[in-house]
Image (tube, rainbow, N blue to C red):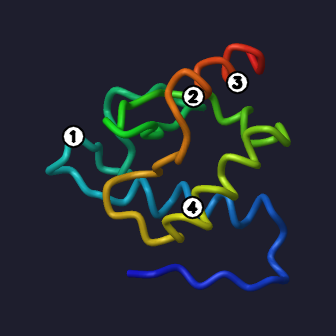
Amino acid sequence: MAIRISNKLPQTAVIKQILKRCSSLGKKHGYDEDSFPLDVPKGHFAVYVGENRSRYIVPISFLSHPEFQCLLHQAEEEFGFDQDMGLTIPCEEVVFRSLTSMLR
């Protein structure tokens, strides 16, 4: 199921579509009835980073930071919007940890 995104959608709508797509894996993968992971607190989302696809839980507030938006743009360019195994960020873990520690 691919997401078609119009160039006319505001960036927040595009981000919401990405998050919705990444959280639509279903109950059988540890998700509740609203299709959200059981171990992810409200106001956060999971991303997968690096070669080993290490899982990180980040606050939704990161979506408003230009630096994090740059990572999302790189993910879109490399993987597109049809990511079956969750939102994957194409950067090294050490870089991701450094960026997220600065954003906190």
Kindly identify the residue that appears in the image at 80 percent across and 76 percent down: 9
**How far apart in space, not on screen, are marks 4 and 3 (Cα)?**
21 Å
**How far apart in space, not on screen, are marks 1 and 3 (Cα)?**
28 Å
**How far apart in space, not on screen, are marks 1 and 2 (Cα)?**
18 Å
Q: Amino acid at mark 3?
A: Leu
Earlier in the chain: of badge 1 and badge 4, it is 4
Circle 4 packing at 10 Å, graded few (<14), some (14-19), many (20+), is: many
Circle 4 is placed at which residue position?
Answer: 18
Which mark is on residue 99?
Answer: 3
Residues marked 2 and 3 touching at CB (< 8 Å): no
Q: Mark 1, mark 3: which one is toward the viewer?
A: 3
Q: Quadrant of the N terminus?
A: bottom left
Q: At numbered mark 3, what does the secondary structure look like: helix, strand or loop?
A: helix
Circle 2 packing at 10 Å, graded few (<14), some (14-19), many (20+), is: some
Kindly identify the residue that appears in the image at 38 percent across and 51 percent down: 34
Earlier in the chain: of badge 1 and badge 2, it is 1
Q: At numbered mark 2, what does the secondary structure look like: helix, strand or loop?
A: strand
Asked whether, in this view, residue 101 is left or right of residue 1, the answer is right
Circle 1 is placed at which residue position?
Answer: 30
